[in-house]
Image (tube, rainbow, N blue to C red):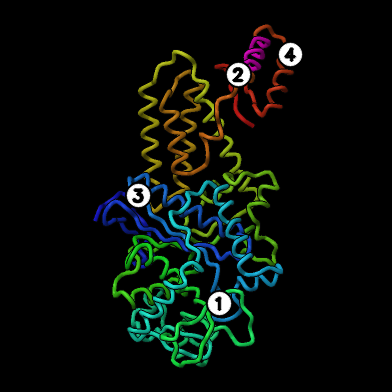
Amino acid sequence: MKSTSLHLYNTQSRSLKEFTCDGNTVRLYTCGPTVYDYLHIGNWAAYIFWDTLVRVLEGEGHQVERVLNITDVGHLVSDDDEGEDKLEKGARREGKTAWEVAEFYTEDFLENAKKLGLIMPDHIARATDYIEEQLQLVRRLKAKGYTYQITDGIYFDSTKFPRYGDFARLNIEELKAGARVEFDPEKRSVSDFALWKFTPKEVDRDMEWDTPSDLLDSETSQRGFPGWHLECSAIAMKHFGDTLDIHTGGIDHIPVHHTNEIAQSEAVTGKQFSRFWLHNNHMKVDGSKISKSLGNGFMLSDLEAKGFNPFDFRLLVLQSHYQSESNFTFESLEAAKNRRHHWKNVACLRWQIKPGSEENTVLTDTVLSEVTDLSSALLDNLNTPKALQIADKLLSTIENSFASDVTSGSIHVTVMETLDKLFGVDLVASTPDINEKTKQLLNSRQAARDTKDWELSDKLRSNLLALGVEVKDTASGSVWSYL
């Protein structure tokens, strides 16, 4: 196992553990969206946290092979085995087919992921593309005696997997019917879950497949569809084999979805399914749970309509630790916007270093020390709040040095690139050098100031503002930045 300086909180052990990896490639699986509707900001927070994990791993020299599933079938409205499939519900709501709904919201997810600057996974795995793999997993479980059939489908017998409750610290004996799931009297145990659901004869589904005869207890043909939990195991095992390095998801996945993943995967292979499990906490809005009834399930488009950039939201998310419950307010989003604006202002200074300035060794050493502190914070269980504070200090150091005519030279550029790599906030790309026309306006304004022609100076300032460039006059000269 290759050791690193990275320590992560492993849900399975309920403790902070040094992350080790067999080889240089980290096999990372992330539970993806159920594509029946637009994602709200609470959903997006999770993907921002796991994108940060990828960036930190890559910063440690790892190659990351990542799978993100797209749940486009089988996720019932109860999150368990009862109710309508969310995709079928979405299709009825919009007057489309479930296939059309899945395609539309998958594309919307991918477009918004790009807006947020998320590193795209190596494998974006739609559940409907892995039906054969899911059926094969059911077949293997049946061969080992872990399945049984009832009226509405094929189920996993959790009583045959003694460690079923370990991951979520469930007390199976005290788990009463209806407390965690709506109990079907045909089920052998309240904790049993559907591997493959049968389509009721009176229901017309867009998404259904023939159930292979060798999986059925009788010769009667059945159409059906996979259970929600089955897809993640089948997809992960298809790409990574029996064991992956890190599995991520939300804390709501712990008691049901991830517990069931572990049971069905380890029952088949007899091996540990994932070496590390990471879970992010919920985001609230103005102190309340996100819900349609409260109308607080804001989407990225809602934030953009109010003049915020997706990268502003990204910084807001990182102000909280992934394990802590966070709270969204528009005031906090405004603060994140101001922070990013300040960062961009400092990034613009790299184009304004005076010709002939020499690198300052003391400053360079100070900056490099703060960069090390920033990396150390992220290696400590992705401590993004602390890392952001260090980044603020780091940029203030650069800003103050510029104001006192001390240059950080090339180290300035290195810092901007480092912040982009770790936080993904688009500093370098969003702050190119101004063009020659704008530089001429700046020079003309400075000439007007030198001759105390304040009227012309103010007019040229307004012209610059119209071009999206703001000028501030300091003791060490005029400094420009983008609005």
Q: CA distance from mark 3 to mark 4?
A: 56 Å
Q: Report how far apart the C-alphas of labels 4 and 2 lie in the structure.
A: 20 Å
Position of residue 416 measured from the top left corner of the image (x, y, whole percent): 47, 34
Kindly report the distance in space between the C-alpha atoms of the residues bearing marks 2 and 1: 61 Å
Structural crowding at the residue carrying mark 3, measured as other residues with C-alpha within 10 Å and reported as few (<14), some (14–19) or many (≥20) = some
In the image, 476 versus 442, the foreground residue is: 442
Secondary element at image label 4: helix
Mark 4: amino acid: Leu
Few, some or many residues within 10 Å of mark 1 (<14, 14–19, 20+): some
Q: Main secondary structure of the magenta part?
A: helix
Count numbered badges in the picture.
4
Residue that mark 3 sits on:
63
Query: In the rendered image, which residue does mark 2 sit on?
Result: 436
At a point 59% along the width and 75% down the height, the residue shown is 85
Query: Rounded to the nearest whole Å, what is the CA distance between mark 3 and mark 1?
Result: 37 Å
Question: Which is more N-terminal, label 4 or label 1?
Answer: 1
Dot 1 falls on a residue whose secondary structure is loop
266 or 407: nearer the eye?
266
Q: Is residue 465 left or right of residue 176?
A: right
Q: Earlier in the sequence, mark 2 or mark 1?
A: 1
* Rendered position, 471 above or below 208: above
> Which amino acid is tagged 2?
Glu
Span highlighted in magenta in the image: 440-449
Q: Which residue is mark 1?
A: 208
Q: Residue 100 at x, y = what percent?
A: 63, 65
Question: Which residue is tagged 4?
Answer: 456
